[in-house]
C-alpha cells in the first residue's frame, strides 16, 4: 500500500512538473511578438505608384494637416550651402509645395544645441561631412489642438531630443526652447515624438520604448520617462522611428524594423548583427495597440513594407495618409529610382489592422505632375 501511494505521489509530482513546464513555455511565447517578415506580400508593400512629391533630399519625412487648411512638412535635411537647422514646406494639396525656409537655425536660434560636437564623419549618401551639413535629425511639426500651439520636436545625433514652441502662433515660428529643455535635452536619445490624446493630455514619446506625460502648460514633462509595456521580439533588434496615434479607440504604437533574410530563405525582423548591412531587405512599419498609453501592447504586426520611419495624418479629405522617404539602404532601397525624397501613401484600417490603400494611392499619384 505504501509503495503504491509513493508511486501515485511521484506520478502527481511529474504530472505537475510537466504541466507547469508547458504553461511556462506557453506563457513565455505569449510575451513575444512573431518576428516573421512578410517580404513579397504585395498587399502590405508600398504601392509601386508612389513617387516623390517634392524633389528635395529629405529623410524621416513628417507631414501634418493644419487648422489653416495647409499641409506642413519637415524632416532631416542636408544643406551644403545653407544653415543647419529645421526646414519646412507647406502645400494646399500635397502636390505643390512652397518652401518656408529654415524655421529654426542652429546658428541663430539654438542655445545649448550649439555646443553639440558631431562625429567627424561623412554621410555615405551625400559624401558631405555630417559635422558641416546635417545638424538636426527627424524633426516633427505638431499642432496641439487643446492649446492652439504649434510645436516642434527634434533631435541631434548623439545629443538628445528637444521640444520647441512657436512664439508667433504660426507654424513657421519663430521657435524657442520650452523650459524643460532650456539647458539640456528633454530626452537623452534620438527620434523623440509628441502625441496629444483625446482629452488634451500631451505625451513625449522617446526612442524607442519610452513615454512621459507633459505638464498641462507644455513647459516640461510631468513625470519621469517610463518604459512601454510591449511584447518585443526575442531577441529584440534595434528599432527606429517611434510614433503614436489614436485609432479604433486604442493607442496605436508605430515603430520601424529592418527585415533580414535567414539562411533558410525566409525573412525575419530579428537582426543578429545591427552593423551588418549586406543582409537587410526593407525598412518596414510595425504596429501594436493598447487600451492604455503605457500598455500592455498587443503583439506587433507588419503594416507598411518599405515605408519606415513614418507618421500618420488625416488630410483635407478626412482620410488617413502615411509619409515615407525611400530609404536607400537594403535590397529594396537599391531598387528605388531615387532615394531620400518625401512621399505619401494612402493607408486604411482593414480588420483592425493598418495597411496601404493601393486604390486611393494610385488615384492620388495619377493627378501628380512630374
Image: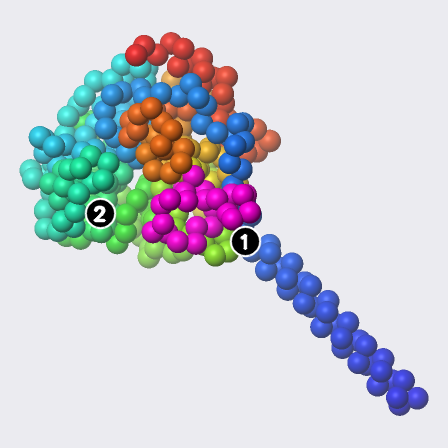
Quadrant the N terminus occupies: bottom right
Could you say which quadrant of the image residue 330 lies in?
A: top left
How many neighbours does mark 2 have within 10 angstroms: few (below 14), some (14-19), or many (20 or more)?
some
Q: Viewed as shown, does residue 159 lie left or right of 300?
A: left
**Residue 57 place in picture, x, y as percent:** 23, 28
The image's colouring method is rainbow
**Residue 130 place in picture, x, y as percent:** 16, 42
Q: Is residue 70 visible in this depiction of the protein?
A: no
Residue 195: within the magenta?
A: no
Magenta region = 253-281
How many neighbours does mark 1 have within 10 angstroms: few (below 14), some (14-19), or many (20 or more)?
some
Gap between marks 2 and 1 measured at Cα? 30 Å
Quadrant the C terminus occupies: top left
- Secondary structure under tag 2 reads loop
**Residue 166 place in picture, x, y as percent:** 19, 34
Front-most of residues 247 and 12: 12
Q: Is residue 41 visible in this depiction of the protein?
A: yes
Point out the residue furthest to the right here. 1
Front-most of residues 202 and 353: 353
Q: Which residue is mark 2?
A: 157
Residue 275: within the magenta?
A: yes
**Residue 210 place in picture, x, y as percent:** 37, 52
* Above/below status of 186 relative to 83: below
* Above/below status of 269 relative to 53: below
Instruction: Please tell me which residue is depicted at 36% across the width and 45% down the height of the picture.
Output: 277
* Of pointers 2 and 1, the one earlier in the residue sequence: 1
Label at residue 32: 1
Instruction: Please tell me which residue is depicted at 30% across the width and 44% down the height of the picture.
Output: 191
Could you say which quadrant of the image residue 279 lies in?
A: top left
Q: Viewed as shown, does residue 150 lie left or right of 135?
A: right
Point out the residue furthest to the left here. 108
Front-most of residues 214 and 271: 271
Amino acid at each position: 500500500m505504501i509503495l503504491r501511494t509513493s508511486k501515485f505521489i511521484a506520478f502527481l509530482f511529474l504530472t505537475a512538473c510537466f504541466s507547469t513546464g508547458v504553461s511556462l513555455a506557453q506563457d513565455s511565447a505569449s510575451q513575444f511578438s512573431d518576428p516573421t517578415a512578410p517580404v513579397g506580400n504585395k498587399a502590405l508593400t508600398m504601392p509601386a505608384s508612389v513617387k516623390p512629391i517634392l524633389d528635395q533630399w529629405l529623410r524621416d519625412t513628417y507631414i501634418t494637416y493644419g487648422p489653416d487648411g495647409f499641409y506642413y512638412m519637415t524632416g532631416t535635411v542636408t544643406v551644403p550651402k545653407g544653415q543647419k537647422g529645421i526646414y519646412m514646406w507647406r502645400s494646399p494639396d500635397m502636390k505643390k509645395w512652397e518652401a518656408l525656409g529654415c524655421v529654426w537655425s542652429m546658428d541663430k536660434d539654438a542655445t545649448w544645441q550649439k555646443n553639440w560636437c558631431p562625429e567627424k564623419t561623412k554621410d555615405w549618401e551625400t559624401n558631405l561631412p555630417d559635422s558641416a551639413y546635417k545638424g538636426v535629425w527627424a524633426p516633427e511639426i505638431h499642432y496641439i489642438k487643446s492649446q492652439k500651439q504649434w510645436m516642434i520636436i527634434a533631435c541631434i545625433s548623439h545629443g538628445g531630443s528637444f521640444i520647441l514652441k512657436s512664439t508667433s502662433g504660426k507654424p513657421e515660428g519663430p521657435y524657442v526652447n520650452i523650459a524643460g529643455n532650456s539647458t539640456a535635452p528633454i530626452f537623452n536619445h534620438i527620434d523623440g515624438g509628441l502625441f496629444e490624446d483625446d482629452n488634451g493630455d500631451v505625451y513625449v514619446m522617446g526612442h524607442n520604448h519610452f513615454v512621459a506625460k507633459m505638464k498641462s502648460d507644455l513647459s516640461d514633462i510631468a513625470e519621469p520617462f517610463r518604459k512601454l509595456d510591449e511584447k518585443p521580439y526575442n531577441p529584440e533588434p534595434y528599432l527606429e522611428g517611434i510614433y503614436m496615434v489614436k485609432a479604433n479607440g486604442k493607442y496605436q504604437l508605430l515603430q520601424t524594423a529592418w527585415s533580414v533574410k535567414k539562411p533558410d530563405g525566409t525573412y525575419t525582423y530579428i537582426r543578429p548583427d545591427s552593423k551588418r548591412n549586406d543582409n537587410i531587405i526593407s525598412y518596414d512599419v510595425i504596429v501594436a495597440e493598447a487600451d492604455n498609453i503605457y500598455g500592455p501592447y498587443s503583439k506587433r504586426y507588419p503594416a507598411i513594407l518599405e515605408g519606415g520611419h513614418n507618421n500618420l495624418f488625416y488630410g483635407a479629405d478626412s482620410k488617413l495618409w502615411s509619409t515615407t522617404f525611400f530609404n536607400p539602404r537594403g535590397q529594396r532601397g537599391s531598387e528605388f529610382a531615387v532615394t531620400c525624397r518625401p512621399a505619401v501613401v494612402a493607408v486604411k484600417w482593414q480588420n483592425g489592422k493598418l495597411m496601404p490603400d493601393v486604390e486611393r494611392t494610385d488615384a492620388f499619384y495619377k493627378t501628380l505632375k512630374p
